[in-house]
Image: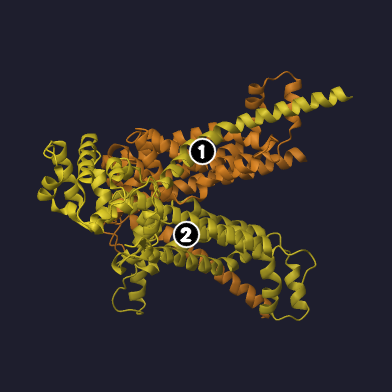
Chain colours: A yellow, B orange
Amino acid sequence: MSGGATRTGQRGRRQNMLTAAMVAPLVLFIVVVFLWPVARFLALSVDNSDISSNLSRTFAAIGDWQPATGSPPEPLLDALVQDLAEARNKGRDGVLAQLINQRQVGTRFLVIKTAKDAAEGKFDARPVGDALLATYPGWADPALWTEIIRARGTLTAYYLLGSLDLQRSADGGIERVPADRAVFVDALLRTIWISLVVTVVCAVLAIPVAQAIVSAPPAWSRIMFALVLFPLWTSLLVRTVIWIIVLQKNGPVNAALVFSGLVDTPLTLIYTRFSLYIAMIQVLLPLMVLSLVSVMRRVPASYMKAALSLGAPWATAWRRVQLPLIMPGLLAGSAIVFVFALGYYITPILVGGPGDQMISSYIAFYTNTTLNWGLAAALSVQLLLVLLASAFLLWTARVLTRRPAGAP
Amino acid sequence: MSAASIRRLAMYAYAATVLAFILVPLLIIVPMSFTSGTSLSFPTPGFSLRWYQELVDDPRWLTSFVNSVIVASASTLLSCLLGIPAAIGLAWGNFPGKRIVYALVAAPLVAPIVIVGVASFSFFAAAGLTGSRWALILSHTALAVPIMLTTVVASLSGFDRTLVRAAASLGAGTVRTFFRVILPLIAPGVVSGAIIAFIISFDEVVVASFLTTGEQRTLPRMIFSGVRESVSPAIAAVAVLLIAFSAVLLGIIGWLQSRAVRLRSRASA
């Protein structure tokens, strides 16, 4: 008896190992091709190794020297020349110049030229300090040295602070960046606001559609459901491009408006916040309908009928009976639409104006155009945190709305 | 007319309006793509096939279409190879960490696509794989495999596991049981999942624009760069062809699903 149980147990264990082994390749694949690349990229938001490893002698020579106390001492400048020469020989001088230039604008050529001269041995005679400062007086600037000293360490908060429009102040505290450079908090708030508007409008548009699908006769219900699903099968890019065609100056919408006499001259509809909302809502609406329908199918129509027959006005009955019953679907749909909307990139780029760009556009911009990977990674961290926080909030709300049976 | 039937009418009218908002843009560009003019103005001046002819004549469109088919087919095949065994393992297995596996595999679905694109670009550049199709195929597989997995897991939910034991008791090995018993029964789910995986890769543009250049351009990438310059009627023609393509694939899936339902009801009857 006990032997039989052990044999079953062994067989069960072997089968569990077999099934785990069947899952393992997929897990490994996702970790290598998705999780690891994303983690590696996000780590760039705090990575400072391009500065710390290329200026290691300089940082060691700084000691407790303060830029305010006077011009940089000879050992420091000597270390700097050695570091820059080595960076030049390793081909890292361009990266280093760019990173220093991000912190102290206008120093790119100072770094590149000094590195070139140092590598060519122009500053080999000791002492180097006077020769260096005579050729490149920029190295006597206390503001530059303040930035360099602040950039020491293998990790940096520079990019994460920057993605929140913050920077280190001269006394080491944290302050807001000048107003003309403060764009990221606005972009973040705009991203959240656009996603919120899209989610709310989707909900308002989707509830009656989902109700119609659920209460229509079976044949009609199937047709309507297929029609809602169909756009999900056409590419996001195609659906976005179509709105450019439909909303352009001489497109169908403007033709209809002019023909009906509502306007005299065609309106600018495309490349505006309006066109962005329209396109995003059209693209995301089917997802909201889908989650609502799956919940509404399980809500018996008799509940509403009972409330109405007991004399409740329709609006009250809907608000007090139907809405709480469909709330799980509404929240699930809102979570999906909101989370997807937060990460939108193609649609804002193609149908939005310059003032309608969301965080994703900035991430793409800083990697493609200015090669500021640290900032792109910091903005990505920010976007993912907002995404996780909102998903968590909506999930909590969903759990809380599952009221125990019989509760009022 | 009673208040209830007025409300009912209003609901259907509202639903019809919203459906029109979703669908009319997809339909209205069909006649516009057959324009004989040089721009996409409305009303269309006259009709011709010139822009479809242009698609055939311009080798860049054909090349990018072939690229998309190659990448999407390879991603679909990889998704099947990784997804089907994993789905069986997850559906039938009883090992710790199943929920973690589900969460892990679902992660590519919810991650903002730009982050996936930038991260893949930096990863494959470090691995020396940029400029090769493999980078895009691997990234697209990561995006497509979650759907493949969920579709196959769903089709396994009604699977009678005594059939596997029966096959084993009749002397069939694991491989033979898989190909002769399991696969035929879950085939509708596998084919649906494969079609969806194909579409995901075929339509994907953001990761493609980070990972491909020049000769490797996919069709969506070609549309994307074209649109940023100007929306020519040729782009409307491509859009119409892609919509028709999706409609055909959706039709196939609908047919497969209704067939699966019929088979299941016949089996239980």
Q: Helix or strand or loop: what does disc 1 sit on?
A: helix
Q: Helix or strand or loop: what does disc 2 sit on?
A: helix
State which quarter of the image contains the C terminus of chain A.
Answer: bottom right
In the image: residue A236, left or right of residue A269: right
Q: Which residue is mark 2?
A: A341
Query: What amino acid is at disc 2?
Result: Ala
- Tag count: 2
Confirm whether residue A242 shows in the render.
no
Q: Which residue corresponds to the image point at 45% horizontal and 53% vertical from the top-left?
A: A381
State which quarter of the image contains the N terminus of chain A.
Answer: top right
Horizontal and vertical percent position of residue A284: 49, 59
Of residues B208 and B67, which is closer to you in this image? B208
For residue B55, above or below residue A161: above
Dot 2 crowding, Cα within 10 Å, few <14, some 14–19, many 20+: many
Q: CA distance from mark 2 to mark 1?
A: 24 Å
Query: What amino acid is at disc 1?
Result: Ile
Horizontal and vertical percent position of residue B28: 40, 61
- Locate residue A397: give its quadrant: bottom right
Horizontal and vertical percent position of residue B119: 40, 44
- Locate residue B184: give its quadrant: top right
Q: Which residue is mark 1?
A: A30
Of residues B9 and A211, which is closer to you in this image? A211
